[in-house]
Amino acid sequence: LEKIITEVKPDIIHTHTFKAGYVIRMKKLAVPVVHTFHGHLLDDPEFSGFKSKVIIEVERMLAKKAAKLVTVGRRVADELLEQRIGNKDQYINIPPGVVALNITPRTEALKNLGLADNGQPIIGWIARVTGVKNPMLALEVADSLPDTHFVMAGGGDLLEKVKTAAPSNVSVIGWAKAEDLFGASDIVLSTSENEGMPVALIEAQLACKPVVATDVGSVSEVLLNHETGIVTNKNAGSIAAAIESLLLDKQKRTEMGTLATARAKALFSVDRMINAHVDLYKSIVK
């Protein structure tokens, strides 16, 4: 199930959904309810079958109590509507506000990560090492690009399995700072099965890094395909081809990184997110 955390404001109840194992009921107060989806669990292997059916029913129930349903991306809203969760008029898209990280210079970043600079290009992967992030797909991609160094950062239930299965050109380093991982990387890779609005990819773009990512959730709203990165299907060969095309064109990588930073600053600023919420709250308490 999902955990529903309720924050009671003077005039509004605002609820958020997170992955967990239980539900907290919303209090029945005569004030508008705003329910925010940071993503959903519909494609998460951990919440399939019966669990998924229960989650959908709970979300349908909660949507009936909400004045507005906020999603971090338009595609997230479309996927929820496909499950008959709420109605189109309830939805509003407010992307997250993301602060740019203080990226570590490459030489220092490699040192912090315990890696040597062997002259190979570096593909960085950072996420929870668990099924929904599909780290095993990243290993398939790496295996087909033996002259490229892949660095996988993060912790999770599949960490030991990934370490055991990793080919020789993959460094599985466990938990690491994103500032270091991005600083060391030429390209950032995401192989997720499911996403809401992936903040790590926004951070990567703010760090001037081109991104190659699977087309899930609102990834295609974070990336402009072939302009700030490449959005691809979940086939290892397609992902490897996308990475290789960028590795062969340094100028293209530089242009993508520059445009990515400018676009991310414009679309995912904290001020923009705050102002959008203020406008939303004003609109429902008139």
Image (cartoon, grey):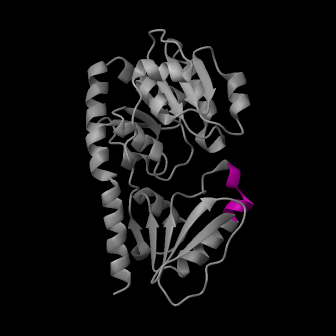
Find residue 70 and report its horizontal and vertical position in percent. 44, 67
- Is the magenta region chiefly helix, strand or loop? helix
Q: Is residue 52 magenta?
A: yes
Residue at the image point whose x is 29% and y is 36% from the top:
227
Q: Relative to 133, does residue 237 appear above or below in the rendering?
A: above
**Split into 4 quadrants, where in the image is the N terminus?**
bottom right
Report the residue that reaches farthest toward the top.
118
Image quadrant assignment for residue 193: top right
Q: Which residues are magenta?
A: 46-53
Find residue 110 and report its horizontal and vertical position in percent. 49, 20
Residue 197, can we see it?
yes
Residue at the image point whose x is 50% and y is 53% from the top:
196
Residue 230 falls left or right of residue 58: left
Residue at the image point whose x is 43% and y is 75% from the top:
90
Residue nearer the viewer, 16 or 238: 16
Find residue 28 and report its horizontal and vertical position in percent. 60, 87
Report the residue that reaches farthest toward the bottom.
30
**Split into 4 quadrants, where in the image is the C terminus?**
bottom left
Image quadrant assignment for residue 101: top left
Residue 215, can we see it?
no
Q: Is residue 283 magenta?
A: no
Q: Relative to 273, does residue 282 appear above or below in the rendering?
A: below
Find residue 253 and report its horizontal and vertical position in percent. 31, 26
Residue 262 falls left or right of residue 192: left
The count of marks equals: 0
Residue 114 falls left or right of residue 206: right
